[in-house]
Amino acid sequence: MLDGKNLPIFEISFTLQTQPFREVACFYAAVGAAASEKGGPATTQQPAQSKPPRNIASDVDGDGVQDITFVNDVPNRPSTNLPVRDELATMIEDTVRSTGLKININSTDRRPCTKSNHCFQNAVDINRINGLRVDNPQNLGNVRILQNALQSHPNIQENFGPALSFRTFPSGSVRNESGNPRIVNPHKNHIHASAN
C-alpha cells in the first residue's frame, strides 16, 4: 500500500472473529522510509509476510547434492537451518541456483534482538562460498559473483559484504553503503543478505 507520497506503508494483517482486517500503520512509512532514502538513519522494521516462514532448501537444483549448508561458526551453537521469511528463502535459493556456487549460511535468526533483520527471520549471513571463507582473497571472484547476483534479485534489501555494500529500499532506490564504516567493518568476513 502507498501513501500520498508513494512511500510504502507497513501493513499489519490479523484476523478478528474469522473476518480478515487490515490496519495501516502510518507511524513508520512517511517518516522512517523518507529519512532512510535521503541518507538519514535507516530503520529496521518487521516486514509484512505474504507466506509463512520456511526453511531454505539445501539442494536447490535437484541433483541430490547439498548446495547450501547450515554450519554455525560459533562452537557449541545450534544449526542455522531455521525458518526464515519466504521472500528471503526464495532469494537465497534463486541466487545459489543461478550462480552454481555452494554456500554456507552461518547465521539466520537472532533472538532476542531489535535492530537487525535477523530479529524478524529476514536475514542470513554467508561465511563460506565453495568451501572457502568469504574473507579469503582467493575467493573474492566468487564473492563478487554471489553479491552481484544477490543485488540483481528483485527481493534484495541489504547486501553487505567484502565485495560491495548496498541497501535497496522498497521504492527501488539503492544506497551505496561502501563509505559507511558502521556497515562495512562488521561485514568483512561474511555476506549479510536480507529481503524486501
Image (cartoon, rainbow, N blue to C red):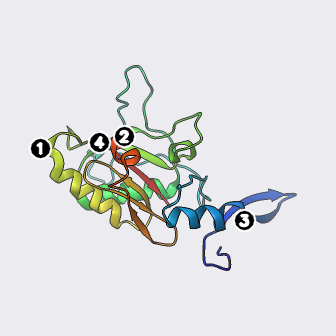
Residue designated by label 3: 26
Going from N to C along the chain, the mark reached first, 2 or 3, is 3
Q: On residue 11, which mark appears?
A: none
Going from N to C along the chain, the mark reached first, 3 or 1, is 3
Q: On residue 186, which mark appears?
A: 2
SS at mark 1 in the image: helix
Q: Give the vertical position of 162 relative to 107 (above or below).
A: below
SS at mark 2 in the image: helix
Residue designated by label 4: 188
Note whether residue 170 is visible.
yes
Q: Amino acid at mark 4?
A: Lys
Q: Are marks 1 and 4 in contact (CB under 8 Å)?
A: no
| Percent of width and height locating residue 41 | 53, 55
Residue toward you, 14 or 137: 137
| Percent of width and height locating residue 37 | 50, 66
**Quadrant of the drawing holding the N terminus:** bottom right
Residue at the extreme left: 138
Residue at the extreme right: 17
Q: Are marks 2 and 3 in contact (CB under 8 Å)?
A: no
Residue designated by label 1: 138
At horizontal 71% and vertical 59% (from top left) the residue drawn is 12
SS at mark 3 in the image: helix
Kindly report the distance in space between the C-alpha atoms of the residues bearing marks 3 and 4. 36 Å
Q: Amino acid at mark 1?
A: Gln
At horizontal 38% and vertical 51% (from top left) the residue drawn is 180
